[in-house]
Image: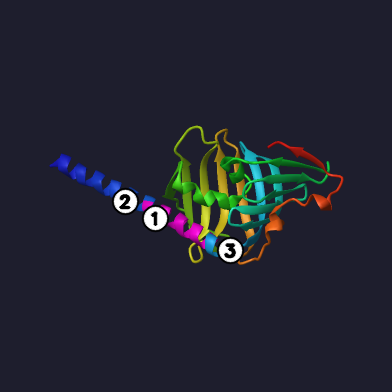
Amino acid sequence: MRKRYLFYILLCVCSVNNVLAQSAHEILSKTAQAFEKAGGIKANFDLTISHNGFTQGHASGEICVDKDKFVLITPEATTYFDGKTQWSYLADSNEVTVTEPTSEELQSLNPYALLYLYKDNYGSSLGTQTTYKGKSVYEVVLNALHPDNNVAQMTLYITRDTYQLLYIQATLRDGTLNDIAIENYKPNVKFAQHDFVFDKKKYPKVEVIDLR
């Protein structure tokens, strides 16, 4: 009798865990759909990098996204990506580095690329956080399924009413934390193709470092 009772408890626990996993997957799917429906997006971001409780870096700026294209603007650098080629322009040194980044490299620059990680290489579950800066949110936790993934875990805060991404915490394998807050979100912004391409004509004396 005890064995049968224990079996039913285990069955219930497994069923609850399965529902939570499906719910997290559904939330991420709806967030990705909302992102795609929004078209061009412009937002401000604030990034803090820390390790063992000590802040190691901080950056803030603006990001413009249109599907797989983006422009990332900070006081130190501007990064353009047109869906294939990336240009990283450093104003102080007046040089631009040209690359064709991997998907993992893009995830470190474009926070919206993280919305699709639940489809591959990461498992998803619901956390416990219910509010963030006065807004009702879902907390979704992504855990890497493979030890070679540099990002071991991610926590996302997503609004319950509009499925808008508000906050990301990415935990790297070495324990480094990347905290990204997204503010002043503006959807349905119209961009042209050239907005995501570095225009060398505007910087005639720039040094081009082509690493492709």
Give neighbour class at mark 3: few <14, some 14-19, many 20+ (Cα, 10 Å). Answer: some
**Is 160 in front, or is 89?**
89
Give neighbour class at mark 1: few <14, some 14-19, many 20+ (Cα, 10 Å). Answer: some
| Marks 2 and 3, how far apart at CA | 36 Å
Residue at the disc numbered 3: 39
Residue at the disc numbered 1: 23
- Amino acid type of the residue tagged 1 in the rendering: Ser
What secondary structure is marked by label 3?
A: loop
**Is 82 in front, or is 108?**
82
Q: Which residues are magenta?
A: 22-35
Spot occupied by residue 89 in the image (x, y as percentages of width and height) = 76, 45
- Amino acid type of the residue tagged 2 in the rendering: Val
- The numbered mark, 2 or 1, whose residue comes first in the sequence reads 2
- Amino acid type of the residue tagged 3 in the rendering: Gly
Q: Is residue 67 magenta?
A: no
What secondary structure is marked by label 1?
A: helix
Is residue 99 toward the left or the right of residue 25 in the image?
right
Q: Is residue 129 visible?
A: no
Residue 185 falls in image quadrant = bottom right
Residue at the disc numbered 2: 16
